[in-house]
Image (cartoon, grey):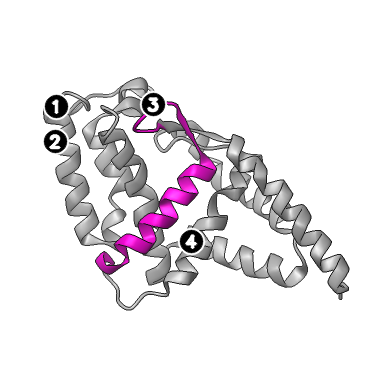
């Protein structure tokens, strides 16, 4: 068993390591400057969404603290695996394997009890079976749709994404929150009407 001093050193090294998440950039852009969002900013905004929107989950009551823990650690794997664009079917093929290896390394920096706890939370999020994981996944997918709608479909237009693909990729939002999914569909249709998202067609990722 680690001494308190050794335990603290491992925890501090983990905290320093995950600072790298601030340098992993996503395809979505910020609503004001339109610069690329980084994954740490996504995690913060996503966590705030969970706190504010928890009342709209399909399942009540929720363990909100458990969800927040999932949210804060879920994307840490992108330090090694990078961010995989939601519509990049080629890179999604081995996404889970790449991210699982990253989870082993990054969470393994912590003391063993925290390593096990973090990996269990990460796996729970990935499996989307518990009410908490379903709502976390719903917010995770709702967030980039919201930013795209508020930035004139920036990432969608850049990559030639169409309405049918957005709906298909994000349909599991309804597993966590029917209200969020209904809002998302209206938001997407408004983006189509505004000319920020194509209704149909097939283009590359």
Q: What is the secondary structure assignment of the residue under circle 4?
A: helix
Residue that appears at 66% across and 48% down: 18
Labels 4 and 1: the sequence-earlier one: 4
Q: Callout 2: 10 Å neighbours few (<14), some, many (20+)? A: some
Examine the rendered structure and indicate whether residue 96 appears above or below residue 6: above
Horizontal and vertical percent for residue 128? 42, 62
Task: Tell me the CA gap for discs 1 and 2.
Answer: 6 Å
Start-end of magenta stretch: 29-57
Residue annotated with mark 4:
125
The N terminus: image quadrant: bottom right
Labels 2 and 4: the sequence-earlier one: 4
Labels 2 and 3: the sequence-earlier one: 3
Residue annotated with mark 2:
190
Contact (Cβ within 8 Å) of mark 1 with mark 2: yes
Please say whether residue 168 is one of the residues in the magenta stretch. Answer: no
The C terminus: image quadrant: top left
Task: Tell me the CA gap for discs 2 and 4.
Answer: 30 Å
Horizontal and vertical percent for residue 47? 44, 56
Q: Is residue 163 visible?
A: yes
Residue annotated with mark 3:
34
Q: Which mark is residue 194?
A: 1
Q: Callout 4: 10 Å neighbours few (<14), some, many (20+)? A: many
> Which dot, 4 or 1, sits closer to the camera?
1
Q: What is the secondary structure assignment of the residue under circle 3?
A: loop
Please say whether residue 52 is one of the residues in the magenta stretch. Answer: yes
Q: What is the secondary structure assignment of the residue under circle 2?
A: helix
């Amino acid at each position: 068993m680690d001494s308190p001093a050794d335990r603290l050193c491992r925890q501090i090294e983990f905290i320093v390591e995950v600072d790298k998440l601030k340098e992993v950039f996503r395809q979505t852009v910020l609503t004001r400057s339109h610069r690329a969002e980084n994954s740490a900013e996504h995690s913060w905004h996503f966590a705030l969404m969970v706190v504010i929107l928890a009342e709209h989950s399909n399942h009540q009551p929720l363990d909100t603290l458990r969800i927040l823990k999932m949210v804060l650690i879920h994307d840490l794997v992108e330090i090694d695996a990078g961010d995989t664009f939601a519509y990049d079917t080629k890179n999604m093929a081995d996404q889970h394997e790449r991210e699982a290896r990253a989870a082993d390394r990054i969470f393994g920096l912590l003391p063993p009890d925290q390593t096990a706890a973090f990996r269990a939370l990460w796996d729970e999020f990935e499996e989307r079976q518990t009410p908490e994981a379903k709502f976390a996944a719903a917010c995770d997918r709702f967030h980039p749709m919201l930013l795209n709608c508020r930035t004139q479909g920036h990432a969608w237009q850049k990559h030639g994404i169409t309405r049918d693909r957005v709906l298909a990729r994000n349909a599991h939002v309804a597993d966590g929150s029917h209200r969020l999914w209904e809002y998302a569909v209206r938001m997407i249709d408004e983006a189509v009407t505004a000319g920020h998202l194509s209704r149909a067609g097939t283009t590359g990722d």
